Amino acid sequence: MELNVVEETPKRLVAEVKGASHTLCNALKSELWKNSHVKVATYAIKHPLVGSPTITVETDGTAKPRKVVADAVSKLSAKTDKLKKEIKKLRV
């Protein structure tokens, strides 16, 4: 996966995520909304077959958008690690 920053201000980050799908973007968006400093968390895919998702995050200004995204990704990673461990327990 490749992340390209399209726009960045102290309160806003817009980034294209090449190689991502609705699955990852929805999970990231949901995790971002759990942060009280996030005012906007959304994504769009211009064309479902050839488009890359563009994620938009806006904060209230007390938290930097890059930091908020990094924190959300870390939390998602921890959740997937926990899920992997639970699935491994099911293997016979």
Image (tube, rainbow, N blue to C red):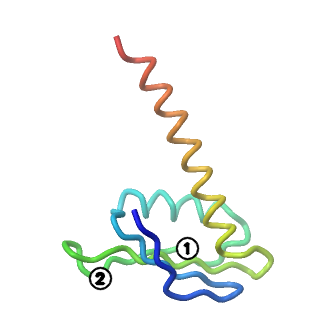
State the CA–CA distance, disc 1 to disc 2: 17 Å
**What residue is shown at x 33% (from left), y 74% (from top)?**
52
**Which sits in the foreground, 32 or 5?**
5
Q: Nearer the viewer, mark 1 or mark 2?
A: 2
* Residue in view at x 49 percent, y 86 percent: 6
Q: Earlier in the sequence, mark 1 or mark 2?
A: 1
Q: Which residue is mark 2?
A: 46
Rendering quarter of residue 82: top right
Q: Which amino acid type corresponds to the residue marked 2 in the rendered image?
A: Lys
Secondary element type, mark 2:
loop
Residue type, label 1: Ala
Q: Residues within 10 Å of mark 2 (few under 14, many from 20)?
A: few
Quadrant of the rendering where the N terminus is positioned = bottom left
Residue identified by numbered label 1: 41
Measured as percent of width and height from the top left, residue 12 is found at 62, 84
Q: Residue furthest top?
A: 92
**In the rendering, at what x and y percent does residue 55 appear?**
47, 75
Q: In the visual, does 46 lie left or right of 79? A: left
Apparent side of residue 62 relative to residue 33 in the rendered image (left or right): right
Residue 58 % position (x, y): 63, 80
Q: Quadrant of the C terminus?
A: top left
